[in-house]
Structures are given as C-alpha cells and as structure tokens.
Amino acid sequence: MKTTSQPGKGSRFDVYLPACSETPGIQSIQKETKIKGGNQSILFVDDETVLCTIFKASLSPFGYHVETFDKSEDALCFFKKNPARFDLIISDIILPGIPGDILVKKAREIKPGIPAILITGSSNLINEQVIAELHINALLFKPITTTKMIETIQTIFEGKE
C-alpha cells in the first residue's frame, strides 16, 4: 500500500491486491469445506432484500430450496399456510414488525422443533440466555460467507447442533 498526503489537499491511498486467475465457485467451496449440500427447504427472512437474493442464489446451487421474505409478517403468514414445507428457518434478529427471535418462537408454536439460525450484525442484540431459552441452533454474525452458512446448515441437518 502506498500513501501520499498533502495538507489542505487530502490523502491518497493506493492499494495493490494480487491478481487471481479464477473466480471461486461452487466447486472450490465444496473442495474447501467438504460440503455435500442437501435438498431441504429453508425459510430465509431478512429485511435487506439484497441479502435475500444473495443467500437464495448462494444456497440453491447446493440443492437447498430457499424461500425468501423481506417482511417477517409475510414470512410468518406463508409459514402458517405451509409449515410442512420447511426444514429450517434462518432469520435476521432485527426486523421491522416481528423480530427474528419472536418469528422463530411463533413458527415453533406451529411446527415444534423446527431448527433455526438467527443472524445479526451486532453482538449486543442477543445473549446466550436468549439463545438457550429459544433453543436456537446457531447464531451467525454478519457478514456471513456462503461457506460459513452452508457449514452451519449442514451441521444442523447432520444433528451436530
């Protein structure tokens, strides 16, 4: 990295990154993590539409069927109509309307024992006591890599969590 600075004119940072001849894809993730993928159905809820799109696109090539919602009320309504369709819930904690932890609680009133992963950008929003009380299978902190998400899902479906 090269830095130049002039008083009154600002600073310039030149960052040099090594070139990569290939783009990491599904095969490299599978090699790196020994991921088998699956055919389970996942309910993914995050108020950031782009994250819904990214995770659906990231998980689908591994065989997962992902239904995304950017509104927790819509997700819960859909879940109530189709509880047998889903094998896992992944939800952000902070959502307008119904927060993720409450969404999981309400979904489990409909389908007891459904596994759940909560995601958050802040460690201050949830503590170990809440995770234990809700029997949350995993808590992931944003940003989440595809590899980390798939490893976590695989661990849950293999019964390790």
Image (cartoon, rainbow, N blue to C red):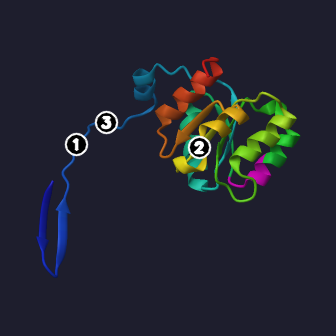
Main SS class of the magenta portion in the image? helix
- Cα–Cα span, label 2 and label 1: 32 Å
| Amino acid bearing label 3 | Glu
According to the image, label 1 marks what residue?
19
- Nearer to me, 53 or 132: 132
- Side of 101 where 30 appears, left or right: left
The residue carrying mark 2 is 119
Query: The residue under label 2 is which amino acid type?
Result: Ile
**Numbered disc in front, either 2 or 1:** 2
Q: Residue at x 67, y 32 (%)?
A: 132
Report crowding for label 1: few under 14, some 14 to 19, many 20 or more residues within 10 A (C-alpha).
few
Residue type at the position of mark 1: Ala
Mark 1–mark 3 distance (CA, rounded to whole Å): 9 Å
- Residue 54, position in %: x, y? 54, 46
Give how far across and how far down residue 93 sits, in percent. Answer: 64, 48
Specify the quadrant of the image occupied by residue 32: top left
Viewer-proximal residue, 81 or 127?
127
Magenta residues (range)? 70-75
Please give the name of the residue rendered at 57% of the width and 47% of the height, measured from the top-left corner. Answer: 120
Q: Residue at x 65, y 37 (%)?
A: 129
Of the 4 image quadrants, the one containing the C terminus is top right
Mark 3 crowd level (few <14, some 14–19, many ≥20, 10 Å Cα): few
Image-based side of 63 in relation to 151, left or right = right
Q: Which residue is mark 3?
A: 22
Residue found 59% across the figure and 50% down from its top: 125
Q: Say whether disc 3 or disc 2 marks the residue closer to the N-terminus.
A: 3
Q: Is residue 95 magenta?
A: no
Q: Which mark is residue 36?
A: none
* Earlier-in-chain disc, 2 versus 1: 1
SS assignment at label 3: loop
